[in-house]
Image: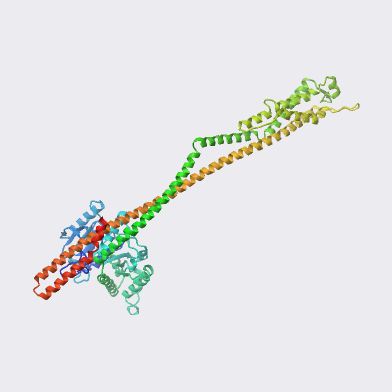
Amino acid sequence: MLTARDNAFLQYDGMQESYLVVVYGPSQIGKTSLILKLIGIRDDDDCFQKVSQTLRTKEITRGNSSTSTAILYARSDTEQYALAVEDEPGKVSEKLFFSDEKELEAKLIEVRSRVVKNRESARSVLHIDIPRKFFTAKTAAENLYVMDLPGVGSKTEGEAAHVQKLMRRYLPVAQVCLVVCTANTIQSLEVQDGLEPYWRDKPGQYIVAATKAFSLGTVKDYFKKPRQQREKSFYDFVMETYKTETGKYLGETSKVEVFPVELADSFQKLCESLEEEDRKEMTETRDRILQELRQSIQQREGQRFQAALQRLQGELKIAEKSRLAESDGQLDKKEKEIKAEENIIKQSEDFIKSETTGDKQTDREERLRKIKGLQAAKNMLTGCVERFGKCCKPKLNEKIDTLIKDEHLFRTSGGGRYLVDRVSALRQNDSDRKVFAALLDYLREKVSGDEGYLDQYVKILKDAGMSVSYNKNALWQKLEQDIHEDFYQEYYPKQSLFHREKVWLEDVRELNGEIVEKVAKELLKYETTWLGELEKVLCNEERLERQGQQLLAEKRKKADDAKARKSTLEAQKAVLEKAREHIVEEIRQDRENLEDYRRIAKEAYTEQYAGIVRRIRQTPGVAEKTKLILLLGMLEEDYKAAIGGCQDEISAGKT
């Protein structure tokens, strides 16, 4: 019946069932060696070594992966190797038979070369039948078909997708998936890529095989004890150890079976370190574990057609109604987030553009020019009074000295010169005023003249854009009056009948300096006031410029941050889009698988139906014919149950 004879690997007309095992695991951990032992290749007469070397080909050294595409290994009904290619499930090319190993090796090299160069689809599955002479005479493995998938953890996305596609294609109709790892990486099974979620909770579908299971130290520690002192057999020791250790990684509630196996070179190296009796026990342990692994595979119900179709239909419904909807929702949310960031970028960039072009840019440039002018004016005007005093003192003294000398406004006494006294001055028609008048004329010109200090100061301020109001004539009149009151008597002190005070020319120079300092002190008041006003204007303009620059910087940062977030969101969106494409591709593959399974089921049904009809025609007894007719009815009901709802699912998917 279809429920018991579920796939293209079953043989009908009373033949025994066959069992498909999918082997999943990384390269170079002994998968091929495990498969060869699993299907029953003998150890004697170097059978195992010959087959292993032939399948790897002599161009590939021992230890390298022999699997460049999926390979299905089985026992041949002849004494020849046979090779066929399956491009689609159930559609296998005509077998090519090889009289010796060299012919097969050459063909395998050619096939692998074509796969590497993409001349032949790496999506194909190679069928290799191994001559029956290499198998044990009687073995429970004679009906095992084992598919070795390309090494998982592939470097390219294409290779990883290929493994996933093969898993989705063959796992539903496989008796079991054999997950292979090394003993020291068994903890990585918890996060193994490629396996369906919660696989550890599905002991009916998965078995774990740990290769390189026995370390040299562990083996020596066990066998160094005399046999009579050993508490348990080597088999019990190994199985109990693995049950304890794997429980830590697979979870205490996981019922997935774990079989520790030691094969090929690593097994030989361990055996070489043991005595004959211990070596025999270790070999028996290995063979017993392999036999238990085979029995575990055959005792499972497997994934029959009806269960496979129901599973795929369920996955299609979930993928279309839930997974795709969830994916579309995530993409829509991500698109809205991207749009929000784009709006932030646009608003920020529009603001930056408006502030750095047109009238606002002109205003900003004008402000910068004004700030530059104010800063220059500040630098020029700061310390002007100090420079005025230092410059005027020597020049004023020089002018007065020249006047006194040229006008003979001095007398000589004791080798020194002094200014003429008031009486003499009166006789000389007030010539004493010449000195004081010359001093005042000089200072008037320096302070309030057309090129004087005040006009130059104000000109610098106005060039910097400041408005200045002052009355230089009033300033000088008051200053002149103060100088006269404070210093005239110092130049020409009053004299009595009996005393005439002399004003020596050295004193005149000191008086000149004091007058200049008085003028400078008065000018400093103006300088302080005007510099204060300039500083206020400058600070305000600089504040406005800083605010503008800070706002532009904030907008630029806001735009840059939004661009960075947008880039991240776009990368996340790309991942989501790829995930959606993966979902769509899985749906497409599942639909193809449904079509393939329906075709296989129909072929199986047709073959079984024809076989029963033949038996009905050949059976003379009525009772036996009645049983066969009932069997025919059960077959038809079974076929309808297997694919009954599948046609509607596929048809709905195509519309």
Image vertical order of residue 44 relative to residue 416, above or below: below
Between residues 26 and 147, which one lies in front from this camera angle? 147
Q: Residue furthest bottom?
A: 228
Between 354 and 490, the one lying in front of the other is 354
> Which picture quadrant has residue 245?
bottom left
Residue drawn 42% across the image and 51% down it: 337
| Residue 20 horizontal side relative to residue 502, left or right | left
Position of 171 relative to 550 (above/below) = below
Question: Along the horizontal axis of the image, is 616 left or right of 594?
Answer: left
Q: On the rendered image, what quadrant is the N terminus found in?
A: bottom left
Measured as percent of width and height from the top left, residue 77 is found at 16, 65
Give x and y (percent) for residue 149: 27, 60
Could you tell me if residue 358 is visible in this image?
Answer: yes
Q: How many marks?
A: 0
* Quadrant housing residue 515: top right
In the image, what residue occupies the spot 47% across and 42% down? 350
Q: How is the image coloured?
A: rainbow
> Is 530 rendered above or below residue 417?
below
- Horizontal side of 629 relative to 515 (left or right) equals left
Residue 9 x, y percent position in the rendering: 20, 65
